[in-house]
Amino acid sequence: MEMKESGVINEQNIAESKVALVYGQMNEPPGARMRVGLTALTMAEYFRDVNEQDVLLFIDNIFRFVQAGSEVSALLGRMPSAVGYQPTLSTEMGSLQERITSTKKGSITSIQAVYVPADDLTDPAPATTFAHLDATTVLSRGLAAKGIYPAVDPLDSTSTMLQPRIVGEEHYETAQRVKQTLQRYKELQDIIAILGLDELSEEDRLTVARARKIERFLSQPFFVAEVFTGSPGKYVGLAETIRGFKLILSGELDGLPEQAFYLVGNIDEATAKATNLEMENKLK
């Protein structure tokens, strides 16, 4: 329905539609399901090379490609490899992923959903997939349980674009400091659980406080998540985002409560929210 409303699918003139869909249902034979991703990629290559278009290829879910390959391998009587996967896993994945590339005539950019069995990022299926991707956005059940949306884990998520020569020194250094602070907080969590926060050094207590603020500041009122959070969506520019994290890391906002950083837009909104919380506490 959304594709029709946006004009991506034109029912009156199918030739003008901007989308081609390929389906592989779970009740179909594994051989047919395994060919779905390759079929879609062949179509994308046609649009790129013949029509000279820039193509956006969505794959949902790349794990089903691996799963179908595993079933085909079992039917062929091959000896299973690690964790029961097919011995040809890396070859099959490479035959798909390495075809997603740009030429002088056009490009193919792929966005893929990756199911992670038992949330184990070292499982051969997601690990083999991640080796081919330029960037990964890892969703965390733990963050979702805390009510932090989007529940993106900044420590497990990666991007080859995060380099000083691409994003700039300020962006890169701020991102690295944020990750270092969150990593230190993660290392201290076992100590906090056993001995309590008071047993930490002054420096570590500051690190924990800032990490908790960062964790909450990483939440954002998404327009598509209004139904879940009850907060109207906010757009925050890159420069504003970097400025906010730099202020938290510098210690200028150490006096603000961590709940002031939850589901706000830029850092100025967090400051205003802290003022409102203080006024509410005084009225109580």
Image: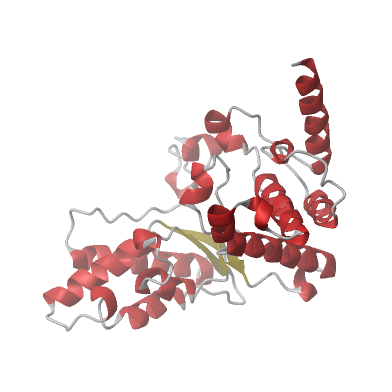
> In the drawing, does residue 67 fall left or right of residue 43?
left
Q: Quadrant of the C terminus?
A: top right
Foreground of the two, 195 or 16? 195
Query: Which residue is pictured at 20% across the width and 65% down the height?
Result: 30
| Residue 164 on image: x %, y % | 78, 73
Q: Quadrant of the N terminus?
A: top left
Q: Is residue 179 above or below residue 279?
A: below
Furthest residue to the top? 283
Foreground of the two, 1 or 91? 91
Query: Which residue is pictured at 40% across the width and 74% down the height?
Result: 96
> In the drawing, does residue 124 fall left or right of residue 276?
left
> In the drawing, does residue 207 fall left or right of residue 48?
right
The color scheme shown is: secondary structure
Query: Which residue is pictured at 80% across the width and 35% down the height?
Result: 269
Residue 34: tell me if it is visible. no
| Residue 215 on image: x %, y % | 65, 50
Q: In this view, does 15 lie above or below 187?
A: above
| Residue 236 on image: x %, y % | 75, 44
| Residue 258 on image: x %, y % | 71, 41
Furthest residue to the right? 252
Query: Which residue is pictured at 62% across the width and 39% down the height?
Result: 222
Foreground of the two, 90 or 279? 279
> In the drawing, does residue 4 fall left or right of residue 274?
left
